[in-house]
Amino acid sequence: MKKSISQATIDRLPLYFRTLQLVEEEEMDIISSDELGRRLDITPEQIRKDLATFGQFGRKGIGYDVHELKDKIGNILGLQNGWRLAIVGVGHLGGALANYVNFSSLGFTIAALFDNNESIIGTTVNGLTVNDAACMKEVIADQEIDIGVITVPAAEAQAVADLLVAAGVKGIWNFAPIRLTVPPNIPLVNEDLSIGLGALSYHMSQE
Amino acid sequence: MKKSISQATIDRLPLYFRTLQLVEEEEMDIISSDELGRRLDITPEQIRKDLATFGQFGRKGIGYDVHELKDKIGNILGLQNGWRLAIVGVGHLGGALANYVNFSSLGFTIAALFDNNESIIGTTVNGLTVNDAACMKEVIADQEIDIGVITVPAAEAQAVADLLVAAGVKGIWNFAPIRLTVPPNIPLVNEDLSIGLGALSYHMSQE
DNA sequence: TAGATTGTTAATCGATTAACAATC
DNA sequence: TAGATTGTTAATCGATTAACAATC
């Protein structure tokens, strides 16, 4: 299972997947690495190299079957698992994510919300009632949650991560701007907005 | 001006900056690359290499002056410019960003909001009145906006980018899941949530 | 002096790009 | 057959890691 695929390759797969979804809606049946690359600003060689990591998906002289390639990439990414998410911290960002529609097109379901603020617990966001964070263990088991999304302040994030791991989530998506420590078998992805904004500022200063 | 610093290095600078801010609050005056690396899960060699790209900031046998290094990195990132942001698209995500507090600690100011939805125009979010997107050019000039933040649906994102560029913004931070085309002198950073979520799903599927 | 730690050069590792045979 | 396009190997490029002299 440990084939050591480069993170750069993995990070491009969702882009391929999303573009293939769009291409599918345009009712194209075949696409070349050239056309896919043109749409994503990625070289066709790079795309063929990425795909070759996982097998042979195309036909020489023809290109790739759009439906088939989309499904294959979806399977590589594990989207068929239909992962269920719980958002911990229903502030502005957590609330926005609870309403984010693009998740469902990738096969994810937001299935539970948590907060520890009395004035937020019990309210309804996008059809889901906000649970008391104290009930995390039961609700996560009950709702068969796979992924914990952390949108609490940095100071509380590690404690929330610990609770989520104890409750049995299989992965963590962290929006708090802090390094978390989790067991090595629990994948963790950090979404750090200050990196992008900082990089933008840097490039704007170079002109 | 084109020294071609690696993007990987640039992306780590905001992490260094933020950690130095925290260390400063702890009233530490000196920090070693070892300690900084421990806090960020980055090797000390990597940190010294990154910093060496921009000059000599430390003292052999001693370490780095926390205040001085923080200021130097802030200047490299251009944070002293006090960039002013405008958010276009005050839906859930745009609204969340408008309320996001971490921006100000990096020296950014959210100075204008835009939408084209009649029922949102004129409302107040975090103390700012939402402007009609039709007035973008005047408001952006008036408010001296530097950065346009795009939080509209993918289908509208390119048109918004064109408007922002025409209005004179110096950089674009794009949250719409689509590749935008902007003039080469306008830095563009894409914030694509499906990459992180896709990568998380991939890693969870490998266990 | 001994210990600590930087800045920098050299070595290694890994990712991207180029080239092209295979083949539809 | 001629043109198109993949899959894969080789070449290049760039980033990280290791090592260590300089020096506080």
Image: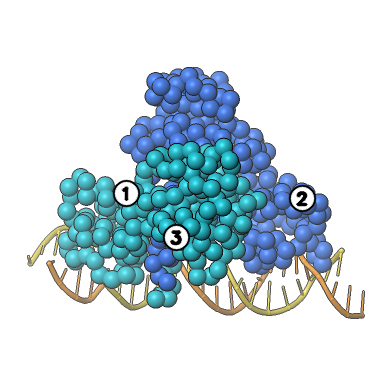
Chain colours: A cyan, B blue, C orange, D yellow
For image coordinates 60% across by 63% down, the residue present is: A181
Image quarter (top left, top right, bottom left or bottom right) of the C terminus of chain B: bottom left
Q: Which residue is mark 3?
A: A141
Q: Is residue B49 left or right of residue B160?
A: right
**Chain ID for label 1?**
A
Whole-Å distance between the Cαs marked 1 and 3? 25 Å
Residue B97 coordinates in the image, percent (x, y):
52, 37
**Chain ID for label 3?**
A
Camera-side residue of A88 and A77: A88
Q: How many marks?
A: 3
Q: Which residue is mark 2?
A: B24
Residue A161 coordinates in the image, percent (x, y):
56, 58
Crowd band around label 2 with a 10 angstrom C-alpha radius: few (<14), some (14–19), many (20+): some
Q: Are marks 1 and 3 on the same chain?
A: yes
Tell which tag, 2 or 3, sits nearer the viewer: 3
For image coordinates 66% across by 54% down, the residue present is: B16
Q: Is residue A21 left or right of residue B58?
A: left
Give residue A19's mark.
none
Crowd band around label 1 with a 10 angstrom C-alpha radius: few (<14), some (14–19), many (20+): few
Q: Which residue is mark 1?
A: A105
Tell which tag, 2 or 1, sits nearer the viewer: 1
